[in-house]
Amino acid sequence: MFYWFMKNLVAGPLVKTVFRPWVTGADNIPKTGAVILASNHLSVVDSIFLPLVIERRISFLAKSDYFMGRGVKGWAIKNFLKGTGMLPIDRSGGKASEASLNTGLKVLARGEVLGIYPEGTRSPDGKLYRGRTGVARMILEAHVPVVPVAMIDTEKVMPIGSKLPKVRRIGVIFGEPLDFSRFEGLESDRFILRSITDEIMYELNRISGQEYVDIYASSIREKLASRSR
């Protein structure tokens, strides 16, 4: 109910009026049944714009740190995130990564839409970076299709480090669904997982027009952070 309220009566109308998002390929999202939307990740506002331009409810896996703020501000942020479909996960690795995978699988088992950023973190410079294979494991274990999604110009609305959004028109492109059922039963094969992930990233590269860099975005962010110390 809170999700519907936020999307249809609060955030949705305001965002659509101010940012005038354009959308292509929305018909590529199945009307029913479980599906993964695998998106590039340019800005923190990607997780706000994407749910508002599709009819179905979408859940995202978000860092648990976002839900742990204190006071009135922390309460407001936590409830806003939950109201827009965010699910808290621990990204510290090991058993935590397995728990995150299971959280996503539960969403898909209910026949719902799960949003994933295969790059694992925001692009530090607008380029498209190497995908993490967790998305491929979910696809094979849940037996679901994946729709590639390209967010366009969202980094201009909320650049890294900025506290307030800028008014810019943004776009969302939904590619054709990708079917990886030919690899069913091979979710433990790391070469298959890499192949699936690379195919997804190729499609994201094609529909977004971003320059592709075959290294992890997190590596670039760590280098940039070390230089600024």
Image (spheres, grey):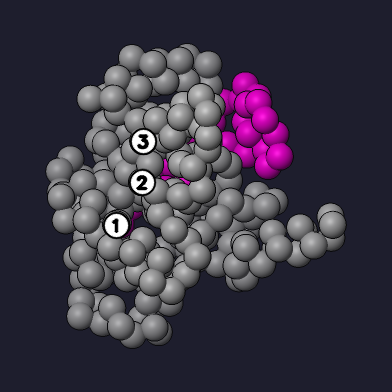
Q: Looking at the image, which residue is at 53% across and 34% down?
A: 70
Please name whichever residue, 159 or 96, is drawn nearer the observer in this view of the structure: 96
Q: Secondary structure at mark 1?
A: helix
Q: Is residue 49 magenta?
A: no
Q: What whole-number distance in Å separates the C-alpha atoms at marks 3 and 2?
A: 7 Å
Q: Looking at the image, which residue is at 51% across and 48% down?
A: 65
Q: Earlier in the sequence, mark 2 or mark 1?
A: 2
Q: Is residue 58 above or below residue 210?
A: above
Magenta range: 146-174
Crowd rating for badge 1 (residues with CA inside 10 Å; few <14, some 14–19, many 20+): some
- In the displayed structure image, the side of residue 113 where residue 69 appears, left or right: right
Q: Which residue is mark 3?
A: 82
- The quadrant of the rendering that contains the C terminus is bottom right
Q: Which residue is mark 1?
A: 103
Q: Secondary structure at mark 3?
A: helix
Q: Amino acid at mark 1?
A: Thr
Q: Which residue is mark 2?
A: 87
- Look at the image and tell me whether residue 146 can be seen: yes
- The quadrant of the rendering that contains the N terminus is top left
Image coordinates of residue 79 in percent, x first then y, are 39, 30
